[in-house]
Amino acid sequence: LLELRAQALENIGSAEGLKALQDAHIRFLGKKGPITEVLKGMGKLSSEERPVVGQLANEVRKLIAARIEEKRAELEAKLIEKKLESEKIDVTLPGRKIATGSSHLLGSIIREVEDLFIGLGFSIEEGPEVEQDYYNFEALNLPKDHPARDMQDSFYITDELLMRTHTSPVQAHTLEKHKGVGPVKVICPGKVYRRDNDDATHSHQFMQIEGLYVDHNVRLSDLKGVLTVFAKHMFGADREIRLRPSFFPFTEPSVEMDISCFRCGGHGCNVCKGTGWIEILGAGMVHPNVLRMSGFDPNEYTGFAFGMGPERIAMLKYGIEDIRHFYTDDIRFLKQFNRA
Ligand code: PHE
C-alpha cells in the first residue's frame, strides 16, 4: 500500500492534463483498482491485520483522492489562464467602420410629405400600379376620345389594363370605398409610368403623391391654405405661393401652384429662368362628374385634389439636375442624402 501511495502521488504530480488525471483516478481509485482489491481481500486477513490494513487503505485512498482534486483545480486554473491569454483583446484599438445603408432620397421626401399630412388629419392610401382603364381615365372624367389617352403616353397591357399614368385613379378607388359618405382625407404616394424617352427631365417611371379631401363645404381657399402649409414646410417658411388657372379633366376649377424661387440669382437664375416663380404641382376642386361616378352626391359634397412629383421636389430642394440620378443607384449620389 505504501508503495502504491508513492506511485499514485508521483503519477498525479506529473499528470499534464485533465485527461491524464482522469486516467490516474480510474487506475488507482476505480472499481478494478488496487485499493478496491485490497479492501475486497480483507476477509482473508487475520483479525489483528484487518483493522491495521483497513485503516491504512482508507487513509491512502483519501490521500490519493485529495491530491487528485488539488491537481484538478490547479490544471483547470492553468487552462483558464491560457484561454484568457489567447483571447486577450486590445480595447484601445480603433474600431472598424460598419457600412450601413440609408433611406433613398425619394423615400425620405415621401415620408416627410406623409408626416406633414398625417399631422393635418390625412391618412395614407395606396392603389395598384397595373390599373384598369376605367380608373386611370374614365372615372376621372377622361372620356374615350380624350387626347391624354393617346397610346403614345401610356404603357398598355391589354385594351382594358395599363400601367397607371398618375396616382389620380386612387382618388376614384378611395371614393368608391367610402360609399358616398365623407369625409375622405387621404394622401396616396406611388409609382407611375409614362411612355417617355428617358432624359434629364423625363423618366418612363417616376413617383407622384396624390392628395384628396372631400367633405361638406370644402372650398378652394381650403386647398390654398393646405398647400401654403405644405410649401412652407417643404421649402422654408419664407416661401410664397401663387395659384395659376390651369386645366385637368378631373378638377374644376384647376390650378397650378408656383412657389417663389429660392435659388433666384435674378436674370441668370437657371431654376426659375428669371421669373421668380417655380411650378410645383397641379391641383383643383374635384370635378362633380368624378364625385358622381364614384358614388358621391356633388350637391352635398365638394372636395379638392392635388398631385405632385417627389422627384421634382427633391430636384428643386437640392439642386439635382438629372432625374435619372434617382433610378441609376450610383452610391456616390445617394450617399449625399444620408439623412434619417
Ligand atoms: N394627375 C395630375 C397629373 O398627373 C395631377 C393632378 C392631380 C392634378 C390631382 C389635379 C388634381 O399631372
Image (spheres, rainbow, N blue to C red):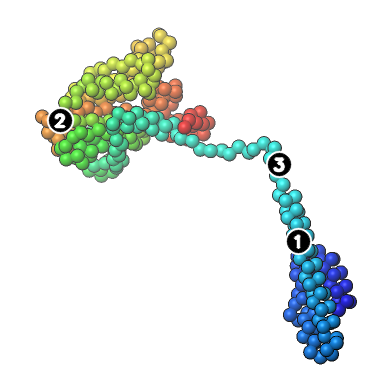
Say which amino acid is labelled 3: Asp
Q: In this figure, which residue is indicated by the disc labeled 3?
A: 90
Horizontal arrangement in the rendering, residue 186 relative to residue 311 (left or right): left
Image location (x, y in percent) of residue 248: 22, 26
What residue is drawn where x is 22% and y is 27%? 304
Q: In this figure, which residue is indicated by the disc labeled 2?
A: 301
Image location (x, y in percent) of residue 284: 22, 24
Which sits earlier in the primary sequence, circle 3 or circle 2? 3
Q: Which mark is residue 62?
A: none
- Quadrant in the picture for residue 57: bottom right
- Element type where label 2 sits in the image: loop
Q: Is residue 151 visible?
A: no
- Quadrant in the picture for residue 283: top left
Circle nearer the viewer, 2 or 1? 1
Whether label 3 lies within 8 Å of ligand 1 gets the answer no
What residue is drawn where x is 60% and y is 37%? 97
- Quick one: label 3, few (<14), some, or many (20+) residues within 10 Å? few
Which sits earlier in the primary sequence, circle 2 or circle 1? 1
Horizontal arrangement in the rendering, residue 225 relative to residue 326 (left or right): left
Whether label 2 lies within 8 Å of ligand 1 gets the answer no
Circle nearer the viewer, 1 or 3? 1
Say which amino acid is labelled 1: Ala
Image location (x, y in percent) of residue 58: 79, 77
Horizontal arrangement in the rendering, residue 60 relative to residue 151 (left or right): right
Question: Cβ–Cβ below 8 Å for labels 2 and 1?
Answer: no
Q: Which mark is residue 73?
A: 1
Q: Is residue 304 above or below residue 155?
A: above
Q: Is residue 278 above or below residue 35?
A: above
Which sits earlier in the primary sequence, circle 1 or circle 3? 1
Question: Cβ–Cβ below 8 Å for labels 1 and 3?
Answer: no
The quadrant of the image that shows the N terminus is bottom right
Q: Marks 3 and 2, Cα distance to the nearest angstrom? A: 71 Å
